Structures are given as structure tokens and as C-alpha cells.
């Protein structure tokens, strides 16, 4: 397997974890390069469910080293909770988890600020997870964040931590008028206790990845969220606080672009999003409810019901272009088993004209009306299918049409169920 970047091609929740799991069996290193504990990656293995928020999904394979890169905002409490859960399930992690010394910390006061900020926006709420991701990235950009590597020198770290707590206390009380006080002593004590477990995992992960690749190791770069939640290229301001496109791997993992051989875009066979923002193909009727029920569309991080709609090829074409995708991984095709007719958005009708281009202005996207094609459904269970040629004729036609509408990018795989085994392999990387 060549060095490969995994990215979501829609608004997140595309089933990246299953594809990462599928590719990780041939990887030596799996590295997260952006986002934080607002991501939720769910892997099903022989009926057992694993949910990851910060620990890279490749950790299930005993031969992999798993890296949290510098582009991730790192919540130590969430991370160690996942470590304990995995250890409790019999997964050995010694020497297989590394955290970048340059990753910025998400601290309790970031979560307080996140919640207070959302509450103050009223009807203009973005719909964040409340995990403190945005405030942590804001502190990073303002050059006042605390980094993981600083935990090595506790005396220096504690002084900076207490100063940061005082700044946030003033901000929360004076600007947000938050009533819940920040308990400085509790935060300091918790970080001191976690530090003992974290320090052995802290490393220069950029150097580690470079050395691994030079030694012929296969590296899989794990993205979180989706293309249209990118802080620059997404439906701003209804986006996450990091760059989610494939190019972010260079800064977020500390590598050069020549190290990337393939970019795999994860594409759900329909479209979903969590939170607010424009969504041209959203179905607010029984169709949306049917998609949500069949796809079990509830957030792995928040439990919130996802908004559901038909496949939008206009946004997918843009995702292919933004990420330079060399493969598509189509997920959740089985969710469409029960539909007699399936719709695909091939163009938008916008201000009296028809376009096949995705608008960069979210205001225009809000007004865009989908132009649909209709295709017959297959109305049978495909979850046991393991070869593309064995899919029903209507399912093969649907997959072929999606590919044609999305610049004919080759397929890596088609997922026909949540379990690792429910996969149709097509073209490897």
C-alpha cells in the first residue's frame, strides 16, 4: 500500500472509520492530522463496536503505530478515557501510541467558552459539539495556546496554565456573563495526574513519520470531519475550526506533499450533515426520516439526529477537485435497499439558471435548488455481496452513475454494511 490520505468528501459522517480500518490492515503507521475530539469514528468488527474520538482508528491492528499529529487539538482527558476503554477490551497499546509535542491542548475552560459562545448566538448557532475545539484553535492562532510538549516541564507548564485560567475566567465572566466558575485547583490537579501517563507518549511525530516512510513503512493519514466543514472551503461559518481537506495533511502531520501517493475520498451513497447550514438536497419529509432510520444517522460524538438527503454530485465534483482524489470509497450503499426510486442531484438551479458548479458563496448555496435525476432502486438486501459484479443491476447502474458524475475517479471499495467483512473490494491503492 502506498502512503494514503483519507478524507471525508461531504459534511462528515461518511463512514471514514470503516475505510480507515479496511486500509489499516496493510499500514504500518496510522496518523491523525487535524480536528479533535469532535470527531467520532465508529468501527464494527465481528459485531463489536469501537468508537474513536482522538485515538487513531488503526489501533485495532496490533502491528500498527498510531500517531496524533501536531494539527490535532488534543483533549488529554478524552484521550486517556479511550486508552482505558481499549485496554479494557484487551487491545495492547504499549509503544503503539504517539502524541505530537506540538499539538495544542484542549482544556476544560475551552469547553466552558465553547458552550457559552454557542448559547450567546441564539438562532445563529453553528451547532458545535461543545468539545472546546474552536476556542482551542483560536488560542493556537492567537499564539497563547498550551502545547502537549510543555507537559514535560511541569513547573513552567503550571505557571502558564494558571495564567491561561485567569484570562479565561475574566473572559467568561465579563464578556459571556457565565455563572459557572472555573475551578483552577481542580484543573491543575487533573493535568498533573494525567501528565504522568502522557509524557511517555509525547514525541516529535513529524520526524517519526518521515523516518518511517524513509524506511519503507506504509503510512495512512486519517482525516476527520468532511471537506465542506473545512474552515476555508466549507459552508462558512457553519464549519469546523480546522482545515479538513487533503492538503492539510502537510501542515497537520508535518510532512512534505511528495510523501503522499494517494488521496481516498469517502463518499456516502446519500448525503447527511449535523448542525446548521445550507443543505440543498435535504429531505425534511418521510424520505429523510427513512434514510435516517435505515442508516442509523445519529452522531457518534453527540447522539444528535443527522439531517438527511439525496446524493449531491455537484458538491462531490468540487470535493474531488479540492482534494485531488485518486480513489473514491462509497459507503452505506445498503441503506438504499428499501427505496423503489432513488434520486441524484446532478445540477443546481440558481437565480433562474442551471449550473453544474458548486458555489463558493454559502449565501448562493442556500438559494440553490437541486436538479434531480431518478434511477430505479434494487429493493433487496445487498449486505452479503462481496463482488461488484454480484450487485443487482440497478445497484451497479447507480454506482456507475455516481462515478461518472464525480469525474470518473476510480472506486477503491463499496461498503454494503457496517461490519468489516461487509465490503466489496474494487481497486487497491
Image (cartoon, grey):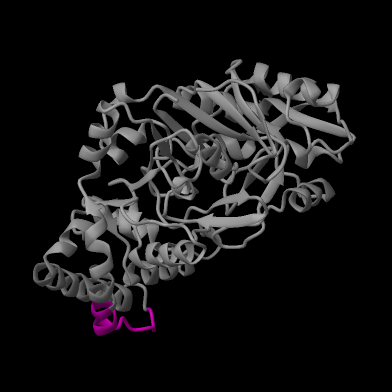
Foreground pick, 414 / 273: 414
Residue 247 lies in magenta, yes or no?
no
Q: Quadrant of residue 151?
A: bottom left
- Residue 270: x, y in percent? 70, 37
- Image-based side of 35 in relation to 351, left or right: left
Which of the image's four quarters has the N terminus? top left
Residue 180 lies in magenta, yes or no?
yes
Q: Is residue 344 above or below residue 52?
A: above
- Image-based side of 229 in relation to 181, left or right: right
Q: Is residue 351 visible?
A: no
Q: How many marks?
A: 0
Residue at 49% over, 45% down: 225
- Residue 362: x, y in percent? 52, 38
- Image-based side of 397 in relation to 31, left or right: right
Q: Is residue 220 visible?
A: yes
- Residue 236: x, y in percent? 46, 43
Q: Is residue 272 above or below residue 195?
A: above
Q: Quadrant of residue 299?
A: bottom right
- Image-based side of 92 in relation to 419, left or right: left
In magenta, the rendered stretch is 178-189
Q: Is residue 333 above or below residue 148?
A: above
Q: Is residue 264 above or below residue 187?
A: above
- Residue 278: x, y in percent? 60, 43
Residue at 41% over, 62% down: 83
Amino acid at each position: 500500500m502506498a502512503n494514503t490520505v483519507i478524507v471525508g468528501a461531504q459534511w462528515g459522517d461518511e463512514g471514514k472509520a470503516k475505510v480507515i480500518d479496511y486500509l489499516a490492515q496493510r499500514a504500518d503507521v496510522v496518523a491523525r492530522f487535524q480536528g479533535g475530539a469532535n470527531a467520532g469514528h465508529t468501527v464494527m468488527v465481528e459485531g463489536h463496536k469501537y468508537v474513536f474520538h482522538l485515538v487513531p482508528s488503526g489501533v485495532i491492528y496490533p502491528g500498527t503505530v498510531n500517531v496524533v499529529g501536531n494539527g490535532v487539538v488534543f483533549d488529554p482527558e478524552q484521550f486517556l478515557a479511550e486508552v482505558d476503554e481499549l485496554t479494557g477490551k484487551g487491545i495492547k497499546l504499549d509503544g503503539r501510541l504517539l502524541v505530537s509535542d506540538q499539538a495544542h491542548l484542549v482544556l476544560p475552560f475551552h469547553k466552558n467558552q465553547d458552550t457559552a459562545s454557542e448559547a450567546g448566538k441564539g438562532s445563529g448557532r453553528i451547532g458545535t459539539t461543545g468539545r472546546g475545539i474552536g476556542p482551542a484553535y483560536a488560542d493556537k492562532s492567537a499564539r497563547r495556546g498550551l502545547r502537549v510538549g510543555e507537559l514535560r516541564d511541569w513547573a513552567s507548564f503550571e505557571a502558564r496554565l494558571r495564567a491561561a485560567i485567569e484570562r479565561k475566567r475574566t473572559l467568561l465572566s465579563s464578556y459571556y456573563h457565565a455563572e459557572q466558575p472555573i475551578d483552577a485547583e481542580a484543573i491543575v490537579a487533573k493535568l498533573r495526574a494525567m501528565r504522568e501517563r502522557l509524557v511517555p507518549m509525547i514525541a516529535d511525530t513529524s520526524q517519526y513519520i518521515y523516518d518511517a516512510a524513509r524506511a519503507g513503512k506504509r503510512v495512512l493519514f486519517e482525516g476527520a470531519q468532511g471537506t465542506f466543514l473545512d474552515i476555508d472551503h466549507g459552508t462558512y461559518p457553519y464549519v469546523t475550526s480546522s482545515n479538513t481537506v487533503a492538503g492539510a495533511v502537510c501542515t497537520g502531520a508535518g510532512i512534505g506533499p511528495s510523501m503522499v501517493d494517494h488521496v481516498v475520498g469517502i463518499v456516502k451513497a446519500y448525503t447527511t450533515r449535523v448542525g446548521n447550514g445550507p443543505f440543498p438536497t435535504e429531505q425534511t419529509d418521510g424520505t429523510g426520516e427513512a434514510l435516517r432510520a435505515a442508516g442509523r444517522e445519529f452522531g457518534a460524538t453527540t447522539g444528535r439526529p443527522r439531517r438527511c438527503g439525496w446524493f449531491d454530485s455537484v458538491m462531490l465534483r468540487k470535493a474531488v477537485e479540492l482534494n485531488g482524489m485518486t480513489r473514491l470509497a462509497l459507503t452505506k450503499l445498503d441503506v438504499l435497499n428499501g427505496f423503489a426510486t432513488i434520486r441524484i442531484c446532478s445540477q443546481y438551479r440558481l437565480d433562474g439558471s442551471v449550473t453544474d458548479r458548486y458555489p463558493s458563496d454559502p449565501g448562493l448555496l442556500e438559494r440553490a435548488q437541486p436538479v434531480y435525476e431518478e434511477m430505479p432502486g434494487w429493493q433487496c438486501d445487498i449486505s452479503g455481496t462481496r463482488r461488484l459484479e454480484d450487485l443487482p443491476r440497478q445497484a451497479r447502474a447507480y454506482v456507475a452513475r455516481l462515478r461518472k458524475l464525480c469525474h470518473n475517479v476510480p472506486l477503491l471499495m463499496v461498503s454494503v454494511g457496517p461490519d468489516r467483512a461487509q465490503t466489496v473490494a474494487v481497486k487497491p491503492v
